[in-house]
Image: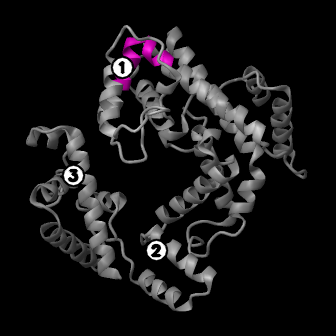
Amino acid sequence: MTENTSHNIDLLLTNPTPLSFEERVKQLRLSSALEKKALLANRITVNSGMSVPRLTEQDEKELSGEVLLQRHRFTELIFEDRSFRQSAISVIQNIYLFRDRRIFFSSGDVTGEAERQQALMLLTDFSLTSPPLSKTFQHNIMARIWGRIVSCGDEELLHNKQFEELQKVVNNLNTIRNIYMVLTTGLVSKLTRQVNRLYSQSVTNEDAHQIGTIGVARASYRYHYRAGRRFAAYASHWVKKEVQRQALDGRLIKISSNLLEKISVAARTGNSEAECKMNASLEQATSYLLDHHAMAAISENRSEEFQNPVDSVEYDNMLQLLEAAIDTVLPTKTGDVIRRRYGLSPYKGKEQSVIDIANTYGVSRGSIYQLESSGLQKLSKHFSQQLS
């Protein structure tokens, strides 16, 4: 699984294909105008020195329609195979559904949990082998199902006809992704030309361009013209988000993305007083601004021996602040879930899985996910207020 440089399952990892980009594009049977444009853009990207053709509104409709059809074909193949269905059931049972994460292409006004139950009922109805287009899996669900099939499948499964069909669909989606990427090199260059000075500690302009293309890839899997926006507007959010995410992950001291946005707005509007206040907050920022990464770091570092006494003291102080906040900010059950998940006192160094905690309390895994998420949000808000 080496086609993509990212290890994130969201990017649909698959075995490299011996077919060239040109051959893969021709297999899609796109309109002749779009096919020629994609091939020309790829040659220009390789040789450089020329301006890349731009996506027209008609191109975006054709590509996004093709993505939806490929996702629907993927969904059909899942319903046609019992083992694939089981992988889908496992993913949907365990995935955390927040407000903007849905399972199907068209979900109506149902809640996330109601949609989960609807999906599980459909997947356990073995008389249904051809789901309607509205029941096409959203990309994030499809990507996780694909990842589970690949990681859990044995040699016999990975070489049968059904799997080959599934992999062909994934390769088609990745080819469309690459078409979007070669046709938006100008957009990515424009968006990443001036990297925010707050990110320059971690990301150079050249790095930002490479990272920005990953943002386009994420956007390409999800975009549909029915959203009412052109692809450039839709992808811009993902490009900026990806650069920001990787830049902040690379910093020694974690910084709130919300704080960076406030500083940027203050600088653009000339509000020097607000900018000074935000910069002061930035200087005070430490790694105990909690998010999932910081919590994971706490549990990982617990077993390490600090070579520097100053680091040891800082870590102990951070841990004391965290455990005091858990006692004062969170309800008893929520606090216990957080302590169990990240190996905090009295479960020192013994992180527990969501399944283990759910069994302990006799509740569903979804309930534990919700308690963990709400607890982390409350802790993050608490520490943010402490710094403001």
The answer to whether residue 370 is seen in the rendering is yes
The circle drawn on residue 122 is 1
Residue found farthest to the bottom: 273
Does the magenta run of residues contain 128?
A: no
From the image, which quarter does the C terminus lie in?
bottom left
Residue, x 74% and y 55% (percent of image)? 187
- Report the residue at 75% width, 43% height from top: 182
Q: Earlier in the sequence, mark 2 or mark 3?
A: 2
Q: Position of residue 158 (x, y in %)?
A: 48, 16
User: 372 and 13: which one is in front?
Assistant: 372
Along the line of sight, the residue nearer the viewer: 250 or 239: 239
Q: Which residue is mark 3?
A: 371
Image coordinates for residue 315, horizontal then vertical, percent: 26, 73
Percent from the top left, x then y, of residue 3? 61, 35
Q: Nearer the viewer, residue 352 or 316?
A: 352
Q: Label 2 is placed on what type of residue?
A: Leu
Residue 304 visible in this rendered orientation of the protein:
no
**Residue 259: which numbered mark, if any?**
2
Residue 57 quadrant: top right
**What is the C-alpha distance between the residues marked 3 and 1?**
28 Å
